[in-house]
Structure formats: structure tokens, C-alpha cells
Amino acid sequence: MPTAVSSTANGVDTERRPLCHIVTPVGMLGYGLQEGETADALRRFVATGVPTAIILDSGSTDSGPERLALGKMGTPRTSYVRDLQKLLRLAQGFHVPLIFSSAGSDGSDEHLQEILDIIKEVSSEKGNEAYSFKTVAISSGIDKALVRDRFKAGATTGYGHCVPPLTEEDIDESTRIVAQMGPEPFVDAMTANPDFDIVAGGRAYDPAPYVGYCAYLAGVDMRDWSSPTVRRQVGGFTHMGKIMECGGICAEPKSHGASATVYADGEFIIAPLTPSARCTPVSVAAHTMYEKSRPDILHGPGGYFDLNTATYEQLEDQRSIRVRGSMFHFTRESGKPYQVKLEAGKIVGYRSIFMGSVRDPILIQQLDHLTDLVKQYVATQHDHLPGTYEFDFHFYGKSDGNTADASASQSPEVFLIGEALASSQELATSIVATAKVGITHGSYPGQKATSGNFAFGIGGKSVIDLGPCSKFSMYHLMDLQDGEERLSLEGEVNGNGVHKKASRLFTQSVSLIGNKDRTLPRNPPPAASAVNGTVKPNGQTRSASAAKASNGLTSSAHSKPSTLGDLAKVVRSKNAGPYEITFDLIFESRDTYLKLRKSGLLSEKMIADAYDLQESDIVWCGFFDPAQAFKATIPRIRAGKRTPGGSFMENDVHGSQQHLPLVNVKLPEELIAALV
């Protein structure tokens, strides 16, 4: 379908021909998208005659291991139906390809098939008789036997220092294994099927479909890893894909989606879809910090891209950013093998919970003592039963006792959840039922409310069975043999006309979904959306508020700042994969950033003190000048032990509520004096 042609319009460099335009409606298939905004962008780009595509990601480990271990899709099936109804309408109406990866969130073969079934259902709906999509599906499921062989050969390593070594038990207990494919299978699929309408990928590195589409159009040979030109091209394509796969998070305020105009040399221009949003050099540069261990070197299949020479230029429309200078370094440049990341989950038991609140101030002051007694009571009531279990409490609104006057900071109500993990569902349910009796009727000194201590019954339930509990069993790199990163295609022959025997991990299936008669007239594209704003010279609609560099909140500058939270424009935490938590402090003022950097306050010691760690525990800590930012990454720790996200006693799998210790860091007086 796509063929590169010239363009001289719509806000792109009219002296050069773009390679393509890419529209990403939302950062995750299944999360909902603004069809009108997406249609407006497609209408502008398609009119230029430059190849244009809808590309988006659908994968994440953010919500824990349940999707891989239990075979659950990332959002309800109805959410995928809703989004694909819109996306297929846009793809068909504007005659642009739809490309996405990590189908169903985990990208397993089962969920890839489920998404294909949804595409078939939507295409057969009344009014969609003209739908006809040549669809290429790329599978990324990995056989346990292969992983076991590579493990025995010493060809597997943990993805980062926080990931424990792989064991044979991990392999055996994993329900299913997927590999994050790189861009090569997408390039191969498009090359083998140039009339494709849809490419649906299994688990993939998030930027892979973006890199694949651009590399396909540019004719990049992904095996030419010694070429400076290829390194520059793939570096730019990967940098663009890393930003775009999250939709419009790179904008201020955050936009649902984003668009990119990409050039063959790797340069790209990025802008938000929402008219009232804008991108700035800082907001775009800062996005490579998001959910990554470090901001400047980002590893992926087959190598890493280096942003130390990247530049970010604000364009005249004050909402678009031109990015240049990113480089990709292939592992094979240094004689190392191509690696892919393996992901898997396993079932570790069965889980039940109860929840409710305590309001009696007499009990709240001695709640720890009562809950310790409850744990002892549970143990004595189950010492005769077979099986194993763990049990503990989550508390919300309870003082940690470290303040000067803990009673003054105590909430008038403490919410708690009792959680059990056991070798059977029956035992887990018995554990929490017994604990609920203990917390409801246990006695304590000074007790006056003798009828009960605990308000429960939310949702009409006193005990809730949660079923199997999962845990990440695999987040490891596996060495590939030459060519295994490519797509397996039937009928491949070498230069001598002999069928190739090379093993390749990823496979494709090709089908025609919808009407078999591809000559039928297409449905018209959606009408233009009504947008309140003014049309700028580049064709983008932009409201007056977009001219302000804002994160969506009005500024409340402090005349005399006292904490880091007073100075930083952004203070955020996020999981950086299942085994790490990363923190970003971004400053709006360059002067403030430089003074803070010079002060020495932002350091490994500050992070270690704030999170009760040893400095040697810190994974990465440093400054990122393009974003006027400081970043630190630490191991994920629960109950004093390093542990992956999700599973038993998880309370912030996303990792997005771990930033408060940094907000409250006190500024030294000499720094305050220099700032005011």
C-alpha cells in the first residue's frame, strides 16, 4: 500500500520530502481514543500524498504478571472492540495502513488471535460491507524447549542488575513465554506483503512497529550495522517510536495522541493531536526519561539508541518539535549477539482478601498491636491444616509514627485490607475469614466499642476470593543465533535457488478479512471535527491556551521555596519494568535547574536517605540537561526484599505514588538564598 511520493505542504519542510507521516491516536490500544482528532490529522497528512499510517502500541507489563500468567487481556474485550471499530473506520476511510504490536497487552499468540477475531467481527458488522483488509499477523510466542536449551548454554541473563538469574524451575513453571521482537519481523512482513492493510504484531519492543514501517519505506538494511547512515536512521526512527508509542504524553498538557513527520535520515517532527496542547523541547526530551532506568542510553532488541547528541528545536507554530541527532548502536558492531527480552509469569498460589475501616481513635492508636495479635490468632487456628500460607495487612491513612506528634497527623479513619496467599483457594479464604473475625471482635486496652471494631461489607462482601496469584518468572535477555530475529517466510531461497534452512523465531499468517472483492468503493472518511481554535499556517488547529507552557495547572510560584516540590515542575515516579522504580524531577526554569545541580543536593545520598537505601543499591542516578532534569532509579523493594511488581501484597504496581519523599525534601538555606 505505502509508496513514497513528494510533498510540499502542511507544515513540513517544503524543501525536503518526508519519508512518511505517522498518527498515534492513543498510547495504548483499548484505552479509548478521540476519533475526531485522529481524523483531522489523517485528513491533513493524506492530502500531501506522503505515505501515512496509523501506528500504536498495545503492550505493557505495568499492571503486573497476571496477563502472562493467567492469559488475561489488558483491557476488557469490549474496549478493544470499541477502539478497533474507530480505527478500522479511519483506516478504511482514509486508505491508510493500521499497524499495532503486543496485541491484547501481553502479545501472546492467544491474544493475537483474539484481536484478529475482533477485527473480523467488526468487518462483518452492518454498514461495513466495503471493509477489505489484507492482514498480516506476526506471532512472538517462544517454545520452552528453546529457552531451556539457551539457559543450559549460558545464553540467558537478567534484564538489569535487579533481575535474579533465571532458573530451570522458572522456565518449567511459566504459563507462556513471549519475546519482545524488534523491528525486523515488521520490515520482513511488509516487504513480503507490500499490499498490506493491517499488520498486527504479537509481543514487541514498543518502538518496533514504528521503526519497522520507517525502515521498510526507506529501504534500510537492518543487517548493515556497520553503516553510520543506518545507525543514524535507525536511531532517529527508534527515538521517534519511543516517544510516539506513549501517545501524547510528550505534550503539555498531555494529549490523547500525537503525530510524527519522519524523514529518511532519521530526523522527525512531533506534535500533539489535541489542539490545546503543545510540545516543547523540554517536554519531548523529558519523555525518554519516562519509565526508563536512565534517559540517555535506552536498550532494546539488537542494541541501544544513544541520545547524547540529540537536539530538540521548537518550530514556529510553538507546538511542534524537530528532533535530530539520535544514534543506534547495534550489538553486532562489537561482536556480541542479537538479544531479545523474554517475558513470562507463573502461578504461585491462591489469594483472598477482606477490607474495611477502623474509626475508633482508641483502637487506631494501638492498631499495630491488635493486628499482630490477629496474625497470631490466625496461625493458631490453622496449625493443624495442610498447606502453606502468607498473610499481612495493607493500611491506608495510618500514621507511620515518625512525625513529632503522630497523633496529630493520624487520620480519623484507617482503611485496611487483609491479604492471604495460600497453596489452595480454600485455605486462603479460611485465613482471611479468620483474620476478619479477629480484627472485628478482638479486645484491646481501653476498649469502649465492644460490639465490633471494624466497618466492613463493601460491595456486599465480607471476604473476597481473588483466585490464582501470579508472579513474574521471566524478564531476561536471550542470545539469538544469526538470523533468528527475522520473520520466517515460506518459500525463501538463497542465491543458489536452494530453500533456506535458517531458524527464525517469529512467524506470520496472512489473511483477507472482510469483503473478498477489493474493488468495491470505500466508505467515506469521517467528517472534520468541530474544534474551537484558530488554524495555524502548518494546518494544525490550536487554541490560544496552547501558547502557554503549562502542564495543565496554573502556576503557583512560591516567593520563598522550602522543598523540592516547591521548585520542580514535574515530580513523578514510575515502574521501569517489573523490578525497578524510577524518579524524575523536571524543572521549568533553566536557572533553577543549574543552581540545584551546582548545589549538590540532588545526589545518590539524597535518594538513599529518602528511601532508606544504601547508595550502592541505586541503579542509576544523574542529570539530563536536555530536559532540565534529575533522575534516579532504585530496586523495587517490598517488606525489605527485592521483588518484582504485582503478586502478593502489591499496593502500587504502577509505581506512580512513590515520589512523595522527594516532594518533601527540605532545601538548604544557602540554596534558598541563591534562588530568591
Image: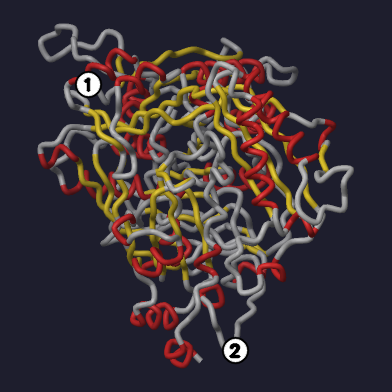
Q: Which x, y percent locates residue 571?
A: 52, 65
| Residue 156 image point, x, y percent | 24, 29
**Measured along the vertical axis of the image, is residue 670 above or below residue 52?**
below
Is residue 39 visible from the viewing direction of this image? Answer: no
Residue type, label 1? Arg
What is the x, y in percent for residue 154? 18, 26
* Image location of residue 627, percent across then percent down: 41, 67
- 161 or 414: which is nearer to us? 414
Q: Is residue 42 left or right of residue 335?
A: right
The residue lying at 37 percent from left, 29 percent from top is 474
Q: Nearer the viewer, residue 365 or 105?
A: 365
Q: Which residue is mark 1?
A: 150
Type of colouring: secondary structure
User: Dividing the image into 4 quarters, which one contains the N terminus?
Assistant: top left
Q: Determine contact: label 2, label 1, CB under 8 Å.
A: no
Q: Nearer the viewer, residue 249 or 459?
A: 459
Q: Is residue 350 rendered to the left or right of residue 148?
A: right
Q: Residue at x 69, y 37 (%)?
A: 526
Residue 35 visible here = yes
| Mark 1 secondary-structure assignment | helix
Within the image, what quadrant is residue 25 found in? top right
Q: Which residue is mark 2?
A: 559
Marking on residue 325: none
C-alpha gap between disc 2 and disc 1: 60 Å
